[in-house]
Image (cartoon, rainbow, N blue to C red):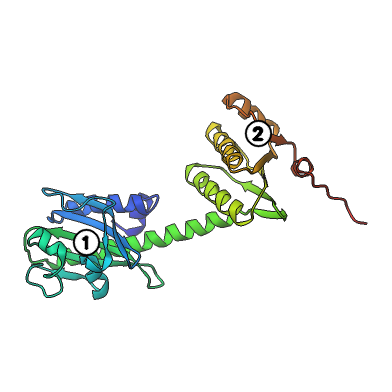
Amino acid sequence: MPRQQLLKQFRNFHDASTSILNMMSQFIHVNTLFIAKNDQNTNQIVKVLNHDEQLLEEGEENPYEKTFCKLAVDHRDTLLIPDIRLDERSKNLDVTKRLQGGSFIGVPIDFTDGTNYGTICGLDLRPQQFTEEHVHMFETMASLLSYVLELDRANRQIQQLSVPIVPVVDGVAVLPLLGDIEETRAQHILETILQESYRLSLSHLVIDVSGTKRLNEQSIQYLVSYAQTLRLLGISAVLTGIKQDLALSAIQSNISFKDITIRKDLPQALAHIGLTFSKTE
């Protein structure tokens, strides 16, 4: 299947990881297929697919220096170890002693700038000779995952640009929201609010939704949760820019706006905080 068709099935790296391991398992007879990431100190299993024996668990962490994954990253190419007890690189590792033998194949997953994310690997309790088909499959999937990583990185950058928090004066900022507020973006908005509120030492945040074309019940709930979260942090939130049709949607949603300050437009919201602006001739 062409790469572009595969990519249409994936919403993000998490989805890609799950689908790729499931697909590989249909063609490659290796007990455990897994994807791991590292920060040069810790190696974490991001996704794993075990068959007969549960060799690894999702979320499992180990010192990076003592893993097969580090060997694969250092190798910089497809690492093939037909028998982990006999290979000089792996025979003294604790994991080899724990497994008491087996085989390993691993390929680095890199960003386009050359920095390493982690590895895609296969691990089995039986020694075995890996074929060219194994190598081709792992290298192709590593390349695909690298591409998905770059798409995820680009999407995060776009999201960051689409959630600008604009300081007005010390302690006061405005968050102008544009477009729809769906689940993934809603979580990013919350993270940005929390990070920027701390960084700017905010006491007041005006959330302006005048650029939002539609609000369904879920997106309205997100707005309410932002205001409630800020209040718990001692930050006053003011919602503004709610149009007539959006107000009607809010009423029909039966969501409580108790203790949430709402003003018609940005000047009124700032005036509520105690800020007024006059035109200069």
- Dot label at residue 142: none
Q: Up-down: is 239 above or below 97?
A: above
The 10 Å Cα crowd at callout 1, few under 14, some 14 to 19, many 20 or more, is many
The x, y position of residue 269, in whole percent, is 75, 41
Q: How many marks?
A: 2
Which quarter of the picture shows residue 233? top right
The x, y position of residue 28, in whole percent, is 15, 56
The x, y position of residue 51, in whole percent, is 14, 48
246 on left or right of 187? right
Q: Let me know if residue 163 appears in the view.
A: no
The x, y position of residue 220, in whole percent, is 58, 34
Label 1 element class: strand
Quarter containing the C terminus: bottom right
226 on left or right of 18? right
Q: Residue at x 22, y 71 (%)?
A: 71
Quarter containing the N terminus: bottom left
Mark closer to the observer (2, 1):
2
Label 2 element class: loop
Look at mark 2 in the image and give the residue it sits on.
260
Q: Residue at x 24, y 66 (%)?
A: 69
The 10 Å Cα crowd at callout 2, few under 14, some 14 to 19, many 20 or more, is some
Q: The residue under label 1 is which amino acid type? A: Cys
Q: Up-down: is 42 above or below 232?
A: below
Ranked by sequence position, the earlier of labels 2 and 1 is: 1
Q: The residue under label 2 is which amino acid type? A: Ile
User: What distance separates the C-alpha of mark 2 from that of mark 1?
Assistant: 51 Å
Look at mark 1 in the image and give the residue it sits on.
121
Q: Residue at x 12, y 64 (%)?
A: 96
Q: Let me know if residue 36 appears in the view.
A: yes
Foreground pick, 214 / 30: 30
